[in-house]
Image (spheres, rainbow, N blue to C red):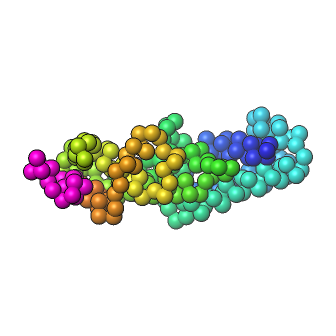
Amino acid sequence: MASREHAQALYDEVAEQHEGSVDALKARLIEQAAEVRQGLTDTTRSDVATALEHSVPEERAETADELEHAADDLGEAFHGSSLTLQKLDEDVAGEAQLGTDVIRIDPQKLAGGDRIVDREKAQDILVHEQEHTQQSAQADAETITIDARTYDARAIREMAAISRQKRIDFLSDEYRGFARVTMDEQDRALVRAGKFRELEARKNGGVQVATAA
Ligand SMILES: [Zn+2]
């Protein structure tokens, strides 16, 4: 489906350059869609612009539709959040600063199925990062041991953030490994407060590891 590929290529061009709010990216995509619909491809001399020049109006209309869908999906997934959309390192879809409201998400890492922006995946990335913003950078232990396996502070915070997600299929092997330790609301509250000792006791059936023998 050429229109889907053209739309993805145009989206990637726009997303690559973007650093700013969700609304600003949405506005740029809608502008792009209008240009495509009108057959205006003079803004770039990219391969996709050239391909679109030779495409029929129906195909251009489909490409424009796809871009508008992507804009809608961004709006739905990130509604009301003040995150920044920008390009991040290759294997990073989102990042947050612990204990602040700073969240950055890479708009080029949201594709799923046949969508440029998979709403569910985008929402999962957001709730994951939102959980990190609730977490204190301080903790009362460097590591905890659960079922004879030791996890460092980073792993503990990731487990809590991953436990907020509906889906984990798009995560790396390392993160899917973290997902094996499940956390409920109470566990997450302990992680947020940096009460790793209490968390460890709770995850080991309420018995302090030091005295469990
Ligand atoms: Zn994380």
- Could you tell me if residue 54 is visible in this image? yes
Q: Is residue 161 above or below residue 175?
A: below
Of 135 and 195, the residue lying toward us: 195
- Could you tell me if residue 10 is visible in this image? no
Residue 50 locus on image (x, y percent)? 82, 36
Q: Give the farthest residue toward the front.
A: 213
Q: Residue at x 42, y 58 (%)?
A: 164
Q: Residue at x 49, y 38 (%)?
A: 91
The image quarter containing residue 175 is top left
Of 84 and 187, the residue lying toward us: 187
Q: Specify the principal SS of the magenta part.
A: helix
Residue 97 locus on image (x, y percent)? 37, 50
Residue 176 locus on image (x, y percent)? 43, 45
Q: As drawn, is 201 to the left or to the right of 116?
A: left
Residue 168 locus on image (x, y percent)? 48, 50
The image quarter containing residue 27 is bottom right
Of 211 and 124, the residue lying toward us: 211
Q: Residue at x 18, y 59 (%)?
A: 206
Q: What is the count of numbered marks? A: 0
Q: Is residue 84 magenta?
A: no
Of 172 and 45, the residue lying toward us: 172
Q: As drawn, is 51 to the left or to the right of 27?
A: right
Q: As drawn, is 122 to the left or to the right of 178?
A: right
Q: Residue at x 77, y 38 (%)?
A: 48
Q: Is residue 202 magenta?
A: yes
Looking at the rendering, the stretch of residues picked out in magenta corresponds to 195-213
Q: As drawn, is 51 to the left or to the right of 200?
A: right
Quadrant for the N terminus, please: top right
